Amino acid sequence: MVLPSASVQYSSRDGERPYHADRELYYVTGATEPETTAVVSGGDEPRLTLFVRDRDAEAELWNGVRLGVEGAQERFCPDECHPISELPARLPGLLDRADRVFYRLGRGDALERMVLEALTRARAKGPRTGTGPRAVVDPGEILDDLRLVKDAYELDMIRRAVDITLIGHRAAAAAISPGAGEWAVEGALDGAFRSAGGAGPAFETIVGAGRNACVLHYVVNRDVIGDEELVLVDAGAEYALYSGDVTRTYPSGGRFTGPQRDVYQVVEASRLAAVAAVAPGATVTDVHDAATRVLVEGLISLGVLAGTADEVIDREGHKQYFPHRTSHWLGLDVHDPGDYVRDGAPRRLEPGMVLTVEPGLYFRPGGDGNGGLAGIGVRIEDDVLVTEGGHEVLTAALPTQIGEVEALVGASA
C-alpha cells in the first residue's frame, strides 16, 4: 500500500493555502506533514517504510520546524525511515516484491508514474520470474471499512470536535438578529471554534437566511438577515483532524411564525423518528425511510402533497422538498468513507459507527404547491453513535425543541 501526503495547494502564484493532511496517510501512520509517503508491505514480514522531508534551516525559518528523518522515526516508529528524496530510488524495489499495489490513482504525478511503471515491469518480466504487481487496487478496499468503525481514541476526538461545534452554534445563535449579516454569524461561529481549541471549521460554514436556507450547500454567506426569517446554520468544528457536523435552524427574531413553526415541527418529528431507528443491525436505509415517512406525512398534513404516504413515497413526490439522504458517515472526514450498500444490500449498522441524522424540508420560492411556505427551509442535524444497546446522540446538548431553540437566538454569552 502506497499512501502519499496531500499536495500543497496555492490560491495563485505563491499564495499558499492552509495545509490539510491526507486522512488515509494519517489514519495509517499518524503523519501530517507535506511531502510524506508511507509504503506498507504485507506478507510474512509486514513492514512500514516512511519517506519524509529532511530538516532544512532555510525552509523552517519560513514555515516552521520539520520532523526530519530522526524525528519521524522517533514519533511514528516505522521499520525504516528515509528522506523523501530517496523515494525514486527505493520505491521500485519495494513495489517489485508485491503481487498487487494498493494506491489511489488520479494524481497524475511522479509517484503515480512510479506505480504504473512497476506494473509495466511486471507485465514484461513477471511471466518468467513470477514476481511483480499485476493490479492496482484502491486503498479504500481495506481502509474504508477500518475507518468506518471507530476505536476509543477516535470517539474521544469526535466527542471533542462535537463539543466545540456546539459552542460555535451557541455563539452563532447569539449573533442572529434582523439586520445582522450572514457573514457576522459565520464569523462568530468560526471564531468560537478557534477560541474553544478547535482547528477551525471542518468544512465551509453554511449560514443561510430566508430563501438561502433552501440552497443545500449555500456557503457565500453574504446577505443581510431579514425580519421573521429562518436562519439555517450548518457547521462543524475540526479537532485533531476529526469533524463535527451539526445543523440547527433559528428564527431571526427569536420566535417562529405559524408556518415556520409548522414546518419545523414536521422536521423535528422526522429527526426523532430517524434517530430512534439507529441501532445495531438496522440499515442506513431504515434510518432514511423512517425520516422520509414522517416528512411525507407532514407534507400531506400541511396540504402540500395529496394522497397517502405510501402513494407519495412510491412516486417520489416528496423529493422536491427533501432531495437529499438523511445520513452520512462522520469521522476524519465530514463525509467519511465507507459504502452505504454492500453486495447489493444496505449496510447494517455496527457499534462504533458514527453517522449524521439530518432530515430537512425546503420550499424554494416559485416552487409548485409551496403556497405560504415559499422561502422556508429547515434542516436539523445531529451526530449519532451506534452503541451496543442502540445509539447515543453526541450532539444532544444543543436543543432542538422549539422553545429552547428560540431562547438561544440573541442570547448573551
Image (spheres, rainbow, N blue to C red):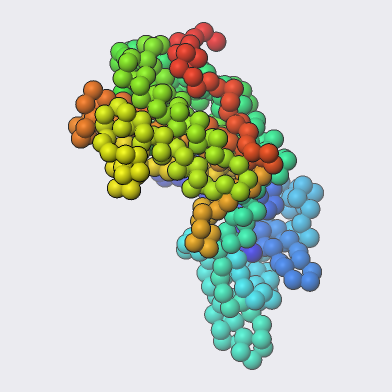
Q: Is residue 231 left or right of 46 when viewed as pictured?
A: left
Instruction: Tell me residue 283's x, y (percent).
Output: 54, 48
Q: Does residue 133 sit above or below 327 in this rendering?
A: below
| Quarter-of-image position of residue 326 | top left
Report the residue at 31% width, 32% height from top.
Answer: 300
**Furthest residue toward front:** 308
Residue positioned most to the bottom: 128
Using the rendered view, name the quadrant where residue 292 is placed: top left
Residue 97 percent coordinates (x, y): 69, 76
Of the pair 102 and 392, the residue shown nearer to us: 392
Name the spot of residue 383 as percent of width and height, x first: 56, 34
Q: Is residue 256 visible?
A: yes
Residue 153 horizontal/vertical position (percent): 72, 40
- Camera-side residue of 317 and 41: 317
Of the 4 image quadrants, the one containing the N terminus is: bottom right
On-image quarter of the C terminus = top right
Q: Is residue 28 left or right of residue 384?
A: right
- At x 23% / y 23%, what residue is drawn? 372
Image position of 171 with respect to 368: above or below: above
Residue at (45% x, 28% y) in the render:
269
Whether residue 154 is visible, yes or no, is no
Q: Is residue 174 above or below residue 160?
A: above
Rendered position, 22 above or below 204:
below
